[in-house]
Amino acid sequence: QVQLVESGGGSVQAGGSLRLSCAASGYTYSTTCMGWFRQAPGKEREGVAAIYTGSTYYANSVKGRFTISQDNAKNTVYLQMNSLKPEDTAMYYCAARWPGYGCVTISPGFLALSDFPSWGQGTQVTVAS
């Protein structure tokens, strides 16, 4: 059974940084597309970043500020968030595609929620202006 557990959220001032972690268990995630999504109050959930066998993908809104990475030994995916803005405030979710599936980006939208059957519980990020 796939389990994803996020951590690392919190409150920061604009311009600050946070690093989110997603610990995966239940399968070998290193050969599966892993994604980070976020959902702000009153808005739809949107893709932020994804990673698959070392290749990384980013939404335009976070390019140059966010970095996704993975530690295969720890079965953990990270999202380093720098130069945070108030509009980055949201609940952040880690998600996984089916085992063995790569990342597929779409336009518009960047990542399709329906491509990710497994989700974590989310971690809150709040950026104060």
Image (cartoon, rainbow, N blue to C red):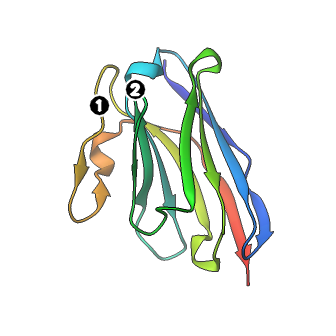
Residue 68 located left or right of residue 109? right
Q: Classify mark 1: helix, strand or loop.
A: loop
Give the x, y percent position of residue 117: 36, 36
Q: CA distance from mark 1 to mark 2?
A: 8 Å
- Which residue lies at the image location 32% right of the left edge and 26% below the top edge? 98
Q: Classify mark 2: helix, strand or loop.
A: loop
On screen, 35 above or below 109?
A: above
Q: Earlier in the sequence, mark 1 or mark 2?
A: 2
Q: Quadrant of residue 88?
A: bottom right
Q: Residue furthest front?
A: 64
Residue 102, disc? 1
- Which residue lies at the image location 66% right of the left edge and 69% below the top edge? 84
Question: Mark 1 is on which residue type?
Answer: Gly
Question: Mark 2 is on which residue type?
Answer: Thr
Give the x, y percent position of residue 36: 49, 48
Circles 1 and 2, Cβ within 8 Å, touching? The answer is yes
The foreground one among 5 and 83 is 83
Give the x, y percent position of residue 94: 52, 43
Residue 122, disc? none
Circle 2 packing at 10 Å, graded few (<14), some (14-19), many (20+), is some
Residue 2 located left or right of residue 89? left
**Mark closer to the observer (1, 2):** 2
On screen, 31 above or below 46?
A: above
Please identify the quadrant where the C terminus is shown.
bottom right
Give the x, y percent position of residue 93: 54, 49
Q: Quadrant of residue 97?
A: top left
Q: Which residue is mark 2?
A: 53
- Which residue lies at the image location 33% right of the left edge and 50% below the top edge? 113
Residue 7 located left or right of residue 100? right
